[in-house]
């Protein structure tokens, strides 16, 4: 197998039946299903679906910006992202679940059609590596942190990577 062959599929684990994850206990399978619901919300461009599994005081932290706090903050972030990247799709290639912690990795792709992150809409496509860590509390996602290869994405869409410096 070549280095990235297994990473270049359009199949996403979120499309697999949750029952197929037989190495998880019931709580872990439920937590994974919750994270998959959140991820499917992005695929179908439905911030309400994302919010349906987020705690009221939950945090969604995309590492290129400030953390979005609570449903109002997450909605503002989500609506802006969906407007800027209406074809955004995460492809989940692997998951790791341990109790109330769920991590997933794969790639994200889409087209930057409108301004976001203070950068212009370029009409260019991106496809880059992605990793997400989620923490579940009291039956809801309390915290999400998205990591993705921002420099790769910025180069693909024509944004200046200097804006990534803090």
Image (spheres, rainbow, N blue to C red):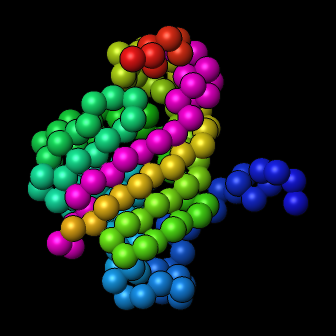
Quarter-of-image position of residue 109: top right
The answer to whether 42 appears left or right of 125 in the picture is left
Please give the name of the residue rendered at 72% of the width and 52% of the height, measured from the top-left corner: 8
Q: Residue furthest right?
A: 1
Residue 22: image location, x then y, percent = 53, 88
Q: Residue at x 21, y 73 (%)?
A: 139
| Front residue of this view, candidates 38 and 134 | 134
Q: Is 124 on the left or on the right of 139, as rendered? A: right
Residue 33 vs 113, above or below: the answer is: below
Q: Where is residue 104 drawn, in percent x and y?
A: 50, 59
State the image coordinates of residue 162 (x, y, percent, origin top left).
50, 11
Q: Residue at (70%, 54%) from the top-left corner?
A: 7
Residue numbers of the magenta segment:
138-159
Residue 123 can be seen in this image = yes
In the image, residue 77 sits, relative to residue 60, either above or below, namely: above
Residue 45 belongs to magenta span: no
Q: Relative to residue 131, is residue 124 depicted above or below?
A: above
The quarter of the picture where residue 137 lies is bottom left
Horizontal and vertical percent position of residue 33: 38, 73
> Which quadrant: the C terminus?
top left
**Residue 150 colored magenta?**
yes
Query: As rendered, which of 29 and 91 lies closer to the eye?
Result: 29
> On the rendered image, what quadrant is the N terminus found in?
bottom right
Q: What residue is rendered at 42% in x and 38% in y?
A: 86
């Amino acid at each position: 197998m070549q280095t990235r062959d297994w990473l270049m599929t359009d199949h996403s684990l979120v499309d697999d039946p949750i029952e197929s994850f037989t190495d998880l206990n019931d709580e872990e399978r439920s937590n994974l299903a919750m994270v998959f619901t959140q991820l499917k919300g992005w695929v179908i461009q439905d911030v309400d679906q994302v919010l349906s599994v987020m705690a009221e005081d939950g945090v969604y932290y995309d590492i290129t910006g400030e953390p979005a706090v609570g449903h109002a903050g997450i909605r503002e972030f989500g609506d802006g992202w969906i407007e800027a990247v209406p074809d955004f799709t995460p492809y989940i290639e692997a998951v790791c679940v341990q109790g109330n912690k769920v991590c997933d990795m794969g790639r994200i792709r889409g087209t930057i059609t409108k301004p976001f992150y203070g950068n212009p809409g370029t009409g260019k496509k991106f496809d880059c590596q992605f990793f997400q860590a989620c923490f579940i509390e009291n039956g809801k996602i309390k915290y999400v942190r998205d990591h993705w290869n921002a420099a790769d994405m910025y180069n693909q869409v024509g944004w200046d990577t200097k804006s990534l410096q803090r």
